[in-house]
Amino acid sequence: MRTTVRRGVGVIALSLLVLTAACGDDDDDASTGEDGGSASGSAGEAATAAEERLAPYLEPADSIGIEEPLSGEMPEGLKVYWLEGNIQSILPITQGFEEATEDAGWDLTTLTYDPADPQGPGSAMQQAVEGGADYIAVSGQTIDILGPALDAAKSAGIPVIDMYSTDEVGGEEKGIYANIGGPGYSEASFPVLADYVINDSGGDAKVLFVNVPDFQILQTVADATLGQFESECPECDVESLDVTIADLTSGSVSSQVVSSLQSNPDIEYVFVAIGDLATGLPEALSSGGAENVKLLGGVPNPEQLQSLADGTSVAWIPLPRPMSAWAAVDAMARIELGEEIDQEQHEVLPIEVKTQDNIETPVEEYEGPEGYQDQFNQLWGVDGG
């Protein structure tokens, strides 16, 4: 087995998302991939197996994954506070909260904070507690970061809904009542994108995996992605580039990626865990002489989806961020009615892989399966907007 994982190329950081890259469709022993080649041995077998695993996710998802209607009438007049980190990948969630709470007839307050400020999430949560929230939702944070503010919410009897967090759900004991898009989603979705690389490369990929481990959920993404390469692609090589939130917000990620590629010119795939890490990256790859490197990743913004249509990236797993807010509101309604929440159905969001072959044009923000709003409103027994 030739798979290697080398961490710490470049700046090593705290915790956010995950970025990976894979390469290698020019090797003589690679099986048939996007650029041809002849299948042979374990590499060809790995590529064929990956193609079979990948195939279902190239079709559009059609269900929100939550099945049971509410046990009673939709609760009325609840006050929801949404804590919005001001990075591009978070903003579409706000749209979802605005639409879902409007259909539910609830009152929404959005509090914006700087995710690069360690005190930002806790300060916003404390403000929500003092504002008299009935429910609080926050994305990408953890119990240890929220600290005393989460304790204040627990003392006030305010349920907190996590989104894209590594926290375990623990109800009153932990103050976290649901985790939308938590580790289960990362563990289910990112190996699928690794399978795209394994298949596309003919089972002999050389990958640069870019990650912001400042967000702990992204370490889960990294573990799931790197684990898939290690277990399913014996001939793959993977290197990791860890960057910080400050690198992300300052726009220095692209130069670090190009520097890594110049140090290792054999890399042919750059795999980023979150679209924000790829802002300006196609242009940087081109100007840095790495225009043949294939770019892909998770959580694309419209800019990255447009790059698919333009042919400057090859694959993305879009995160249904607006729909995830509806799932959070659904969880709040069920808590209010005293229902048990099916955590798996709320955590594992719909999974699709967008490629140059199936990207819709003109490109738009991926919100979720077609008609997802109507599916929620049917579960809630409301007419909707």
Image (cartoon, helix red, strand yellow):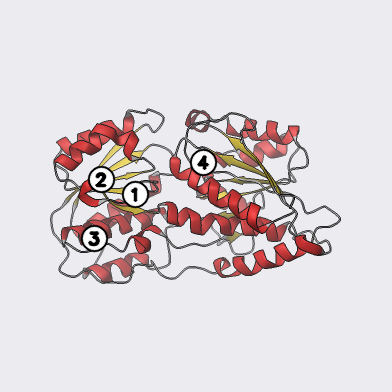
Residue 227 lies left or right of residue 165; in this view the side is right
* Element type at mark 4: helix
- Label 1 neighbour load within 10 Å: few <14, some 14-19, many 20+: some
| Among the two numbered marks 1 and 3 on one chain, the one whose residue lies closer to the N terminus | 3
Residue 256 lies left or right of residue 154; in this view the side is right
Quick check: 320 above or below 369?
A: above
Q: CA distance from mark 3 to mark 2?
A: 29 Å
Q: The C terminus is located in which quarter?
A: bottom left
The residue wearing badge 3 is: 103
Residue at 25 percent of width and 71 percent of height: 69
Q: Are marks 2 and 1 in contact (CB under 8 Å)?
A: yes
The residue wearing badge 2 is: 174
Quick check: 377 above or below 237?
A: below
Disc number placed over residue 276 in the picture, else none: 4
**Kind of residue at badge 3:** Asp
**Kind of residue at badge 2:** Lys
In this rendering, does residue 319 appear at all? no
Q: Residue 348: x, y in percent?
A: 42, 60
